[in-house]
Image (tube, helix red, strand yellow):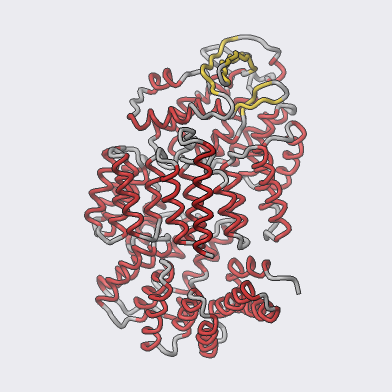
Amino acid sequence: MHNVKIRILSAALTVAALASGASAQRIGMYPLETSDSVLALAVPTAVARSLETIDGAITPAPLDMFLAVKQRPAFLATLDKVFSLDALVNGKLEGAAGAYTIAYTIKRGTSSQTVAVRGADFAALVKSSNASLVAALGLKPSATDTQELAAVERNIPAADVVTASAAPGSEGNGAILDKGGQNPWALAAKALVLVGAGKNDQAVALVQPAARAAPADPFVQAAYVVTLVAARKQPETKAALDVAFKLNPAKPELHYLNGRYWLRSAAQVTPEIAQKALDALNLALQYNPRYLEAAISTADLLERFGNAEGAVNVLTRLVARVPDDANLHNRVLDTLLDSDRDGAVNYLKEVVKAYPDVPDSVYALAIRLFDSAAAQKLVDAGELLYSSSAPMAFARGYLLERGGTYEQAVTAYKQALQRDAKFQRAGIALGGALSKLGRLDEAEAALRGAFPELDQKLLARMYLQTGRIDRAKTVLVKLPQNDFEVTYLNGVAAWREYRADDAQKALEAAVKLNNTDDRPKATLLEIPDVRRLGAPKLTGEALYQFRLGQALLDTGNPLEALTAFNKAVKVSPTDVHALLYRGIALLRTTEPDEARDAFVDLAKIAPKNAVVLTYLAAAELTRGRFDLALEQITAALALDKSYARAYYILGMTYFQQYALFGQSSDVTAAREAFQRCIGADANFRVLVDPRLSQLPAK
């Protein structure tokens, strides 16, 4: 079955390549890793791409701008400069106020036409050609930047905007201008930028009067929906959606936002709510088959309810349309790495084979593979194609860091920054590698280089993610203690120091401050283990490597975590904590046989430890040995009848047996185990509820 899935995926990618042609490439409008200058160059194209025809008039789609800012928050300053937002909101353009006409020369195939559309002061967003924008900003794009920009420009769906110019004029647009001279389009534009920067309440306050002033304007009303969804204002969102749908029922962004609305409309996402959201997202994809955000949201929802194969299918249908969008491939890998590790390796190999001109950032995704040999081969191939690429140098550094070769990783990250000084991810990684080496002042300097105004919470996060708990606490104590992020990070620090009561108190407080962020909820699941294991007796380098390994597991780096745990075990070969977490790292790198052997050896050292036996059962379950998993989990529960994780593994054993064999007795046993799990620790609902929803009704 496994090999069949790989063959199907390979065939699908090959067919997609033949159908679309290798030359039909498109750089993602918001590339995963590019310099600010590249994104700045793409802004006029992004706005032009967002123009759509509604009743014969061309109007802009609202999501593109805020997504651009969301992708790179630091780009807000550049947007201010490009968009001249203050001038827009004040109703001024080149020293004058009033209505404007924008003339677009649009090329479709071999024919072209010039279309005059209403623009008012919104014309400032698109009046500059890329050439004049380069001159205005003093940008000097590299050859790679120019190549990426050309790819963006030549693949605007249905039409290429060749020129865009604005001139004072009157096309009967006075109705959209309020008496104060403020333009609703301009207000909506700035509100969307504010949403992209995370300033949602300000955005709502700005666009509300615009929505009242222009009740029949599709762009303004759609922008209003965007801001309300972002600010999580549920009743207002429903009313605004009703208005927007009447103006443009076929607008894909509105159906996407409707899906988002359904997901936020209830305290718990039931299967019924999920289906309503899926229906809305599917409509978004029907109206716009290239709609990456809608596809990703659909995949997230399908995977959440256990349909990983459906999630992969939704995403891979977009490959032919956006073959070089790193965000798409990143999300496919997310799903495959959880459900089909060999399929993940094969997927990326097939993508770069079928589309040889995909950008360097797609090759760089190889670092996420758990197959180190395959990852290294893809990175080596990428470096041959993109010898001056910052993402490829970053990928090389990441692979070195994953193997524990931190000094060489530092050199590679510095090379990435030499190639692109604004490559933020490399600056962050450099700080992390330096922190692991104990060069903390240099690490902080690297972060400051990546962020003009270094957020102290980011600094604390870096220290926590590199095992420097004391340094993180020193930063956190100086910050407002009622801040969600600070509260959450305090909980993580307490967890890593095995202060169970302090950790639980801080994490529960974080959930109260922000119930929509899943990180505190996920971390609370570690507390039962913390209470049962007690603090480790490790000291010195062994303790540091152990904490580093825990942090790396928490951030999704099990291979590098395994390297750290191996170092801890080398110093303290009989320590239960180090050996247990070494087994967990093996389990997460899909080495179930090795993990099982590690837990068996540990059980000889700690035969009466319920945590050890529970993870041994989890390893047996991963190997498909339901009989052995039940044997070990029964032994664990005999030792500790209040251990929530043990009940969860028991429930998953019966759940997977039911999935394979369809026995109703397994349904009953799974449901009972899951309910006991929640009874032992209600925090496990985040894991249990999706499984309960997949079981047939009583």
The quarter of the picture where residue 138 lies is: top left
Q: Is residue 627 above or below residue 308?
A: below
Q: Is residue 609 above or below residue 337?
A: below
Q: Is residue 191 left or right of residue 400?
A: right
Which residue is rendered at x = 44% and y = 21% of the image?
130
In-front residue for pair 310/462: 310
In-front residue for pair 602/531: 602
Q: Is residue 173 left or right of residue 358?
A: right
Answer whether residue 348 is visible to the viewer in this image. Answer: yes
Indicate the position of residue 412 as horizontal and vertical percent values: 26, 48
Which residue is rendered at x = 59% and y = 40% of the image?
291
Quarter of the figure that contains the N terminus: bottom right
Which residue is rendered at x = 66% and y = 70% of the image?
692
Q: Is residue 39 above or below residue 497?
A: above
Indicate the position of residue 168 as horizontal and vertical percent values: 59, 9
In-front residue for pair 409/327: 327
Indicate the position of residue 380 as horizontal and vertical percent values: 30, 48
Indicate the position of residue 394 as horizontal and vertical percent values: 32, 47
Q: Is residue 505 left or right of residue 664?
A: left
Quarter of the figure that contains the C terminus: bottom right
